[in-house]
């Protein structure tokens, strides 16, 4: 019975994560196929390119919610089983990146990574979101910000475990999410190394100003 429930949690986590929120919102609000815009991903960064900031924020919120829902389902079905919650969250991240509903396309995993972590410990949102936003705006690379989410989550869960405030299994969630996102971001990491990765935030504004002045 326990193993059957665990498998059900794994499948449901993947299916919830697979809901292509960004694809749906861009199609509904603009009529476009977000997969034909920019990076072709369905996450909030590419949604912002296709539909603007408001739709991007909506996408980020729902991407987080679908992963949080997967963890809440696991906690409800197997209360006290930390591995079930971890697996549900990671399955949702995988589903987001490789959505079965749009031929295994998706985002980079940032939104659901945060959402599942919030379900594991609600106060995560007060730490990850502002720090992640600071990395995104300050460093200027969405891919680096996505990786930073997992690193911050690892640190949070490690500190909580050290202080006897949380289970050590939650640390493995952060490590697993980091590995999954690094795999998904392979093209971005190659562009980072070659200096051709897209720039955002204040650095993008400065580059635009420099180009305008030189034009």
Image (cartoon, rainbow, N blue to C red):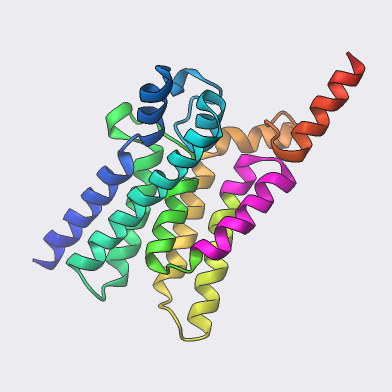
Q: Is residue 59 left or right of residue 70?
A: right
Give the image location of residue 49, x and y in percent: 56, 26
Give the image location of residue 127, x and y in percent: 57, 64
Residue 181 among magenta residues: no
Q: What residue is at 50 percent from the left and 61 percent from the top? A: 125
Image position of 147 with respect to 36: above or below:
below
Give the image location of residue 174, x and y in percent: 48, 61
Query: Toward which corner of the image does residue 170 lie, by quadrant?
Result: bottom left
Between residue 156 and residue 59, name the one nearer to us.
59
Residue 134 among magenta residues: yes
Image position of 122 with respect to 31: above or below:
below
Between residue 19 and residue 175, name the one nearer to us.
19
Q: Main secondary structure of the magenta part?
A: helix
Q: How many dots with numbers?
A: 0
Q: Which residues are magenta?
A: 125-146
Check the image and name the residue furthest to the right.
Answer: 214
Check the image and name the residue furthest to the top.
Answer: 215
Q: Is residue 59 left or right of residue 77?
A: right
Check the image and name the residue furthest to the bottom.
Answer: 164
Q: What residue is at 68 percent from the left and 31 percent from the top? A: 197
Between residue 38 and residue 32, name the one nearer to us.
32
Image position of 185 with respect to 208: above or below:
below
Give the position of the C terminus as an image quadrant. Answer: top right
Give the position of the N terminus as an image quadrant. Answer: bottom left
Give the image location of residue 69, x and y in percent: 30, 55
Q: What residue is at 54 percent from the left and 31 percent from the top? A: 48
Image position of 178 with respect to 47: above or below:
below
Q: Is residue 23 left or right of residue 36?
A: left
Q: What residue is at 54 percent from the left and 64 percent from the top? A: 126
């Amino acid at each position: 019975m326990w193993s059957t429930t665990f498998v059900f949690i794994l499948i449901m986590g993947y299916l919830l994560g697979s809901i292509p929120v960004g694809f749906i919102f861009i199609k509904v609000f603009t009529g476009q196929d977000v997969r034909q815009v920019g990076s072709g991903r369905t996450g909030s960064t590419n949604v912002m390119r296709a539909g603007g900031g408001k739709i991007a924020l909506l996408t980020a919120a729902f991407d987080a919610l679908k992963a949080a829902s997967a963890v809440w389902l696991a906690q409800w079905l197997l209360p006290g089983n930390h591995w079930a919650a971890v697996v549900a969250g990671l399955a949702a991240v995988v589903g987001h990146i490789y959505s079965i509903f749009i031929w295994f396309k998706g985002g980079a995993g940032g939104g659901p990574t945060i959402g599942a972590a919030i379900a594991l410990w609600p106060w995560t949102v007060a730490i990850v979101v502002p720090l992640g936003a600071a990395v995104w705006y300050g460093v200027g690379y969405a891919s680096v910000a996505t990786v930073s989410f997992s690193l911050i989550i690892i640190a949070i869960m490690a500190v909580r475990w050290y202080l006897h405030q949380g289970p050590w299994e939650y640390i493995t969630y952060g490590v697993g999410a980091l590995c999954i996102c690094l795999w998904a971001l392979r093209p971005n990491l190659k562009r980072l190394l070659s200096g051709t990765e897209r720039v955002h935030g204040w650095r993008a504004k400065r580059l635009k100003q420099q180009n305008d002045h030189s034009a």
